[in-house]
Image: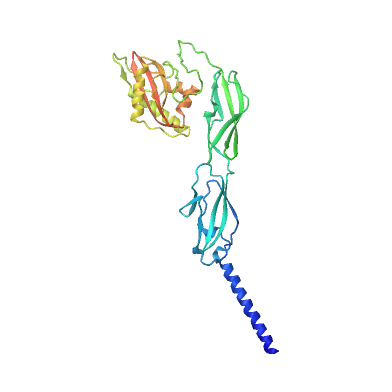
Amino acid sequence: MKKRVVIIVISLIVVFLVGLLFIMHKESNTIILKNDVFTYELGEDISADVSYYLKDADSTKNINEYKIVTDDFDIVDKMLVINKDGEKVGDYNINIVYKKLSKKVIIKIVDTTSPEFTTFEGNIKIEQTSEEVDLINNFKATDLSEVKITIEGEYDLTKEGNYEINVIATDSSENKTEKKSTITVYKKETIKETTVTKQESTSNTPSKNEETTPSTNNNNISNNTPSPQPETSSPRYRKDISDTYITQINAYRKANGLNELPVTAEAQAEADRRAKELSTYYSHDGVGYGFGEIIGNGSIGVDFIVAWKNSPSHNATMLRDHTVAMAASVYEYNNKWYTIVSFRMNY
């Protein structure tokens, strides 16, 4: 009887040890995840390190035998990079593989970040007009997805006054950023022809290629403008004058937080061609493709920079942030200056 009890006890111990070994072996070959779903913000780095997804990865044996297998991502510099085209927000799959075992992990990419305004005009000054004006050009916003800008609020460009508008930047995930701006509509001034001859385009908002610039007289001569030269018998370019325009405009852009623009050979050729052309045909019709321009004509000694700054449309052209180069040219003909600044546009 005693012998039988010993045999039974020994048998139970053996069964227990075999079971324990089986459980330990099974656990050592099981993939245990921290979570089934991992959420990342759009633009955030997604780890390709297997240990990031495993529970108790530090104590997991044979960690080097675990790997990530996926059709939705490429592995670049230990990061998962989505290889799908189009919108990146959504659910993607990876598989954690160990020997013959595999477990699926969902990588959820969300977008909860609102767009940021990179260009925002807090006060838009517009000369009283009945023409349509594209106010959206005064605002830009950036985001990791497509951004749409809309404007809410009532305003009347045919009546003087201040109008408050709400500018809304909305991305593809419906995240929004809203800011207030004011439209100031001011009355169009009537200027006597004997003082200033003013030519303007029919729209108060400058288009890509058209800017009409007022001609001025000798009453607005800047200290930065060289003294008038004696009348000459033959036409000529006044590089001494045009160089000062480049210096003044770049200084003006820098003071407004914009980059200074280089003078390129292409832009200079465009400016010289147009300046001479203006002396016989004063119009924007000859502007080159890919260029915007501001122009002026007046008697020798005129300060066009002051006139351009005082005109909202021309001022906007000098301060555009999507311009990559510029050049200025002054053509002296029949005791008058025909002046142009050509801007190479980034589109």
- The x, y position of residue 100, in whole percent, is 53, 63
Q: Is residue 114 above or below residue 253?
A: below
- Choose top left, top right, bottom left or bottom right for residue 278: top left
- Residue drawn 48% across the image and 32% down it: 256
Quadrant the N terminus occupies: bottom right
The answer, for residue 87, to whether it is visible in the render is yes
Picture quarter with the C terminus: top left
Residue at x 58% of width, y 25% of height: 183
The residue sitting at the left extreme is: 234
Q: At which x and y percent is residue 342?
A: 39, 25
Q: Residue at x 48, y 26 (%)?
A: 316
Q: Is residue 269 above or below residue 9?
A: above
- Near-viewer residue (99 or 247): 99
Give coordinates of residue 114: x percent, y percent.
Answer: 58, 40
On the picture, is 71 further left or further right than 26?
A: left
Decide if residue 300 is in sight here: no
Q: Where residue 112 sits in the image (x, y, percent)?
A: 59, 44
